[in-house]
Image (cartoon, grey):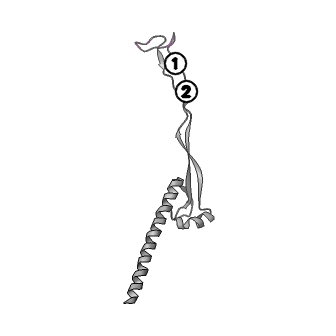
Amino acid sequence: MDWSKYSSLKSGSKVSFGKEKQVMREAVEGKDAVLYEEGDDMPEGREVGDVKEHAVHGQEKEEREYVALSQKRWDGESGEALDDSKREFSLSDLEREKSRFDDEIARAKAQSDGLKKAIADFKKV
């Protein structure tokens, strides 16, 4: 993402942050074990009371919620809208990215200040 364009993309409704959900595990309906009963067709070695179908432990649907940056996309040839591009971000991701740019600015400022002194010295010659 070119963060320098974020404000103009946002004002044009081409980019936005929003909450998303992801299914981590689908729900599973539980069921009791089924036992062989009198009159059932039983395999050899099985008898009444043996387990015919094992119990299944029910599980609730598990979802996670996260924040994603959604960005509009279009087909370059036809101009048709495509599915939005979505990328997950956390606050710490954004803060780390900003810190990286702030560090680059500080390094550039130090270089600029050094060149300013070098230019002053050069002009004295």
Instruction: Check disc 2 and give the amino acid type.
Output: Gly
- In this rendering, the answer to whether 89 lies above or below 52 is below
Q: Nearer the viewer, residue 105 or 55?
A: 105
Kind of residue at disc 1? Val
Q: Is residue 44 left or right of residue 28?
A: left
The answer to whether residue 44 is magenta is yes
Location of mark 1 (residue):
34
Q: Which residue is mark 2?
A: 30
Kind of element beneath mark 2:
loop
- Give the CA separation, mark 1 to mark 2: 12 Å
Q: Main secondary structure of the magenta part?
A: loop
Left or right of residue 71, residue 120 in this image: left
Q: Is residue 87 visible?
A: no
Q: Secondary structure beneath disc 1?
A: strand
Q: Going 55% across and 67% down the picture, which residue do you hit? A: 5
Residue plotted at (48% across, 58% down): 96
Residue 63, by quadrant, is: top right
Q: Is residue 89 above or below residue 26?
A: below
Residue lying at 53% horizontally and 64% vertically, measured from the top left: 3
- Residue 106, x across and y down, in percent: 46, 69
Residue 2, given in percent of the width and then of the height, sits at: 51, 65
Which region is colored magenta?
36-46
Q: Residue 20, image x and y in percent? A: 57, 49
